[in-house]
Image: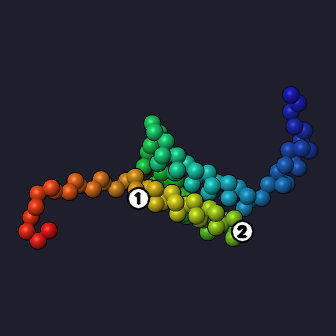
Amino acid sequence: MNEPTEEQLLDALRQIKTEDVVVQTVATLVNLAGQKLSVEGAKDPEEAQKAIDAARHMLPLVPDDAKPPIQNALDQIQMLYVKETQPPDPPESKIWTPGS
């Protein structure tokens, strides 16, 4: 396989826009958080929280046309985080008490 020429590399560099990298980075952080909350054997809520925080801080840098789907995904991941990190509800008592 041939290595890219210097001109091809320069052309690729000219085409890359910072906002594209920001969108990709935020999307990657949201995806990482989702994986850290849902993949058995790789669950790590602390890492998920870091990814969520980083994505939230970078979201204002995302161009307006790309923001809605990323915001929606981030909202869903945040709800999953809350669900996954809440302690389980204690079982209800089966004993009758006055007033219940």
* Image position of 82 (left or right of 36): left
Label at residue 28: none
Splitting the image into 4 quarters, where does residue 99 fall? bottom left
* Label 1 neighbour load within 10 Å: few <14, some 14-19, many 20+: few
Label at residue 82: 1
Residue 14 placed where, x, y %?
85, 54
- Find numbered disc 2 in the image and state the secondary structure of the residue it sits on: loop
> Observer-nearest residue: 67 or 12?
67
Identify which amino acid the numbered label 1 is placed on. Answer: Val
Q: Quadrant of the C terminus?
A: bottom left
- Is residue 4 among the parts visible in the rendering? yes
> Observer-nearest residue: 66 or 94?
94
* Image position of 72 (left or right of 63): left
Residue matched to label 2: 65
Residue at left 52%, top 50%?
34
Residue at left 57%, top 54%?
30
* Label 2 neighbour load within 10 Å: few <14, some 14-19, many 20+: few
- Is residue 61 among the parts visible in the rendering? no
Splitting the image into 4 quarters, where does residue 2 fall? top right
- Find numbered disc 1 in the image and state the secondary structure of the residue it sits on: helix
Residue at left 90%, top 38%?
5
Residue at left 30%, top 53%?
88
